[in-house]
Image (cartoon, grey):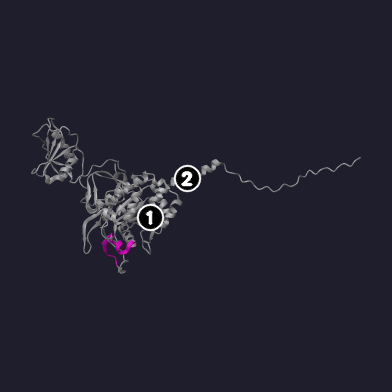
Amino acid sequence: MPATPPPRSRRRPPRPPVRPVRRRRPRWAMRAATTLSVVVLASAGIGHSVVTSLDADIARVDPFKDMKNRPRAGHGMNVLLVGTDGRDKIDDTERRRFRLGGAPCNCTDTIMIVHISEDRERASVVSLPRDSYAETPPHTDQVTGKEHRGHPIKLNAAYAEGGPQLTVRTVESMTHVKIDHYLEVDFASFMKTVDVVGGVQICTAQPLKDTYTGLDLAPGTHTLRGGAALQYVRSRHADASSDLGRMKRQQRFLASLVAQATSSGILLNPLKFRDVTRAVLGSVRADRGFGTDELLDLGRAMRTFSPSSSEFTTVPIGTMGFTVKGIGSTLKWDPEKSERLFRALRDDKPLATAPKARTAPAPRVAVAPQQINVQVENGTSEKGLGHRVDTALAATGFRTTRRPVDAADRTVRRTVVAYDPRWDRSARSLAAALPGAELKAVPGLGPTLKVIAGTEFHEVRPVRGPEPVGKESEVVRGNEVGCP
């Protein structure tokens, strides 16, 4: 018998080693991750990579060098915002157009403390008048190198004597508020920033004209670009309120700028935010600690802001025209009221006690109603019209005779304000309270103006006098100083 072949081995030959297979993520997961990243960046307002490169654009200054015995740190972030001249960076054509003639000065036009609350939901801006009476700490004059003991100055002179460091030290000494960051903005960066955001809307109820800056605005709403905006915030001679009025206009402008930045999508567009930031940082000086992280922090904070999230005020003044030998006329702060104000900053508390309802304020006129004498006449056959007009004008503050009479002509349609040309400002102020009224000059009429009510009379509109140059410090929110 043939031999039986041996059984085959059941053992299979060894397989070559298999490389581990990496599981591929589903495409939907990749898309979701990408989408999430975009959403995170958008919700942050800006991307870190977009602004990281901007650090190099910031000119650095060290305002905190060797500073000792500083105030205790509070809550939130305090930025000292200083506006300087910098007209040497503007070309000759624009300097002539916007009345920036003369040599640039080593001085500060604007000094503000900007407080960002710890929860990043509120911004408080306190204007410090440049003519404030101040006393410097001991320091070295940066021009002469001479050692100085503490001495009286106007607040804006601290920059000329000791630069940013003496400015910070003087402000901290006066307010007991620790300054966390220092930002110095000049004319050029201001104009660029306003242009990049597309202009800022400003409202005025009365004409604003200043031959020094070239400001010339008719009553109404205006969108100001860079140069015109600079004229607006620099103007000190548009009314009788001088530097205090200028600070109020600066506050209005900041409120409108915040509204423009938060409502136009700038903070949600990384590239647009970069352009705005580059416009600012190209001509700004800041402390070494103000960089990318702080820009991101401010961007995220402003993203949640609305005009009502910001509040503005000026440090309360105790004595106007406080004369100091060798310095001149200064503004002396009210010690108790200013201490309450700065304590609120240190404690991270709102400056205003309660939100106010958003109502359109009565327009301002050149002459206060309380200074205008008025005789009312009824120029119609309607019984009691003269008494009704007299009562309404008196309720608005005008000094009526309270004895209305019938006019010689009882067929008047359009209400007439008759006035002596010597009292033309009073006449225009009175006419502002009588919509549709006609102005009629009557030489020799005297100081008492005459209102002849016509059949087209509808109402007396409340008006108020010029902004007071007073001692009180009013806190207003951004939605109360912007355009209605």
Residue that numbered label 1 is attached to? 281
Q: Amino acid at mark 1?
A: Leu
Looking at the image, the residue that sits furthest to the front is 93
Q: Which residue is mark 2?
A: 38
Q: Quadrant of residue 219?
A: top left
Q: Secondary structure at mark 1?
A: helix
Q: Quadrant of the N terminus?
A: top right
Locate residue 399 relative to residue 312 in the image: left or right. left
Q: In the image shown, does 352 or 328 lie closer to the viewer? A: 328
Instruction: State the mark number for residue 152.
Output: none
The answer to whether residue 130 is magenta is no
Of labels 2 and 1, earlier in sequence is: 2
Q: Is residue 118 visible?
A: no
- Residue 445 placement: quadrant: top left
User: At x 38% / y 55%, what residue is drawn?
Assistant: 281
Q: Position of residue 283 (x, y in %)?
A: 36, 56
Return the x and y of residue 313 as percentages of the image width and height: 29, 50
Tell me the SS state at disc 2: helix
Mark 2 residue type: Val
Q: Badge 1, how many Cα within 10 Å: few under 14, some, many 20+?
A: many
User: In the image shown, does 140 or 470 lie closer to the viewer?
Assistant: 140
Q: Quadrant of the C terminus?
A: top left
Q: Residue at x 37, y 53 (%)?
A: 279
Category of crowding for the residue at label 2, using alpha-carbon neighbours closer than 10 angstroms: few (below 14), some (14–19), many (at least 20): few
List x then y, in percent, for residue 333.
26, 56
Q: Assess whether residue 158 is covered by the magenta stretch.
A: yes
Question: What's the distance in space between the residues labelled 2 and 1, CA to CA?
Answer: 26 Å
Residue 249 in view: yes
Q: Which residues are magenta?
A: 149-163
